[in-house]
Image (cartoon, helix red, strand yellow):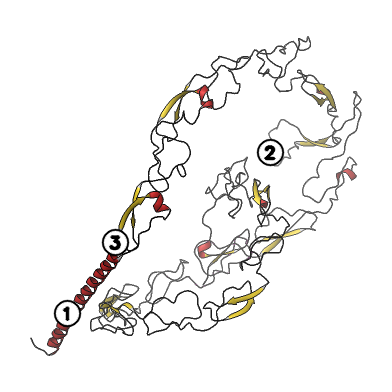
Amino acid sequence: MKIEWCCPKCRHSYGKDEIPRKYRCFCYKTDDPAYHPWLIPHTCGEVCGKRLSLGENCKHKCLLLCHPGPCPPCPQTVNRVCYCGKENKRVRCSAACWSCRQKCRKILPCKSHNCEIECHDGDCPPCNYTSLQLCQCGAEKTKRPCNDLIWQCQKLCYKPFSCGYHKCEKLCHSGSCGSCPHSGIRSCPCGSNERFIQCPDVIETCVSTCGKKHEDCEHNCPAKCHKGPCPPCLVLIEKKCQCSTHTRPLPCSKEFRCETKCRGTRPCGKHGCGRKCCNGNCPPCEKICHKPLQCGRHKCTTVCHHGPCYPCPLESKVTCRCKETFITVPCGREKHTKPPKCNLPCKIKYKCGHAEENKHTCHFGDCPACKAICNKTYECGHDCVATCHQNVLVVFKQVEKPATPWEIQPSKTKIVKLDCPPCVTPILVTCFGEHETDYQPCHTATRRPCGRECGRPLACGNHQCELLCHLHENSPDYPSVPYTCKPCNRECLKVRPEKCLHKCARRGCHPGSCPPCEILERISCHCKVTEMYIRCREIATLTEEMLSCKQQCPKNLDCGHRCKKLCHSGSCKDSQICLKKTKVNCPCGYLKKEASCKAVRNSEIQIKCDESCEAKKAAVKLEREKEEKRLKELELEKNRRELEEYEWKLSGKK
């Protein structure tokens, strides 16, 4: 019986091996994330870090904190070419693939025509032209579509192999036919005799024992050398049944099952197994559970199982306040489900009379506060821009007196009429340092610092006052506000000369230019072997000769020999011509001669084989033939002795 688990949220069914066992955050980094009041529920609070795209073009990661749902499209900007590669522009990484709307003009696989469609993604469509094409073996020629260059004529090759006895039986193909499959090093089926055969010879079975190990056991095959798979193993061994209760001598290849019934309990923990010769892994129970479910209305209809039952698979309705809108939820989840949002208008009327300004949809609980504007006039001449405050729900504190449980406690909230709040009409006010003029509420309008730096030039002429916004002159209205700038006490921050990384020799900020830098710097020569000490002010005017250590260059040329020039800049590839002596061999390798490296690399020196090479080759060939003849005679003598010994054993002599 198949066991499934139904998710109470999405109602999707999962198999026994797919049931989730761990609870992780949305980015899958933390198991059982702790609750935090300032974070989204079920998040770990760390950076998401997921790949924004699974493609090869985008390797950026999501920088948002652990969040539900999919990651947003990649916002990075990258340089991308169009599909055909003609134009390049900077686009969003999530929309990096784009078309220039020009003709593709890429060469099609036929190598004869170009793609004529608009700049597109993926491979070009097949070529629509036709041409005369040869088959793979070159025997036939016909007119075919350009997009199908490889085709076969359905004829067998029948080209003779090098052995002269057999022919190639492959279907029309290109290239060589290879060597004859019937010649070469071959062995008998048992592998004990191996020799080189030539067509038309065929190797047969020998008189030795097969000796191969069976696939299902460790015994060797006792049959004589044979073709095909080995017969079943017939060695008698003591075998145990699957439940390990009985033993019996049986052939190795046969399986032993007894008639003893299992007394174990099935995975449900309630019913017995009863299966014959059970190995301990009792099968799942097949009876129906029939236990009451958590919803309290229905019973479990799945097979008997261990542990609590799965949630009820049926559904119920949850409605809004006006009963017009509803949603379906799993049975038993009505009390824990938020009612659906209804888009129909609310029918409750406001006591202040502002009905048109407060239209809203159906909802549970009290209606929201009135949103109409008061528009009463203040003493300053401005109008009240606050929302309606004629009927406002307020919370007030009261001294709670001891009372019995049956006495009614007074309410802590009350609907009252409030006075208009202070005037908040914006008025233009300038800050102390006259950096900006902003709007402030009418009832709190006054000059104040804007929070920016003063910015007035200091006496050094290089920096500006960094104090926060203050008055430029003494004012009796603001006696505690400073009106003088602080003197400059910084170090010199002027731009240093090129390649100079040291600080200015003068102390503190100063007018005018900085003195030359006299600090010694350690610099390597061109070949990186010797280090020299040079003053920092001279580094910008160094020449190639000054950076040379006057020693031989340690680098190697392309030919592998060492460069003969003195320490120099750049690569040694084309700096000189190598004239070092090197050896050159003839094609067979018997003749040798020395020549310059330049001549060898330019193929100016070539050695051809002469009569001595042919004589050496003939001598080597004659020696090889003598050795093969000697080995063949030894093999014939060995076979003769083995045959005599075999006949002697068959004759029964001792």
| Circle 3 Cα neighbour tier, 10 Å, few/some/many (<14 / 14–19 / ≥20) | some
**Residue mark closest to the camera, 1 vs 3:** 3
Between 577 and 645, the one lying in front of the other is 577
In the image, residue 347 sits, relative to residue 369, either above or below, namely below
- Extreme residue in the bottom direction: 651
Q: Which residue is mark 1?
A: 638
- Which structural element holds mark 3? loop
Identify which amino acid the numbered label 3 is placed on: Tyr
Report the residue that reaches farthest toward the front.
611
Marks 1 and 2, Cα distance to the nearest angstrom?
121 Å
Q: Nearer the viewer, mark 2 or mark 3?
A: 3
Residue 543 as seen in the image, left or right of residue 379: left
- Can you tell which of label 1 and label 2 is closer to the viewer? 1
**For mark 3, what is the residue?**
590
Three-letter residue code for mark 2: Thr
Task: State the CA–CA distance, disc 1 to disc 3.
Answer: 38 Å
524 with respect to 13 (left or right): left
Observer-nearest of 453 and 137:
137
Q: Which residue is mark 2?
A: 404
Q: Main SS type for the magenta part? A: loop
Q: Residue 402's spot in the image, x, y percent?
A: 68, 34
**N-term mark: 2 or 3:** 2
Quadrant (top left/top right/bottom left/bottom right) for the C terminus: bottom left
* Residues rendered magenta in the picture: 282-308
| Residue at (17% x, 79% y) in the render | 638
> Eyeballing the image, is 654 above or below 391?
below
The x and y percentages for residue 266 are 44, 69
Helix, strand or loop under label 1: helix
Name the element at disc 2.
loop
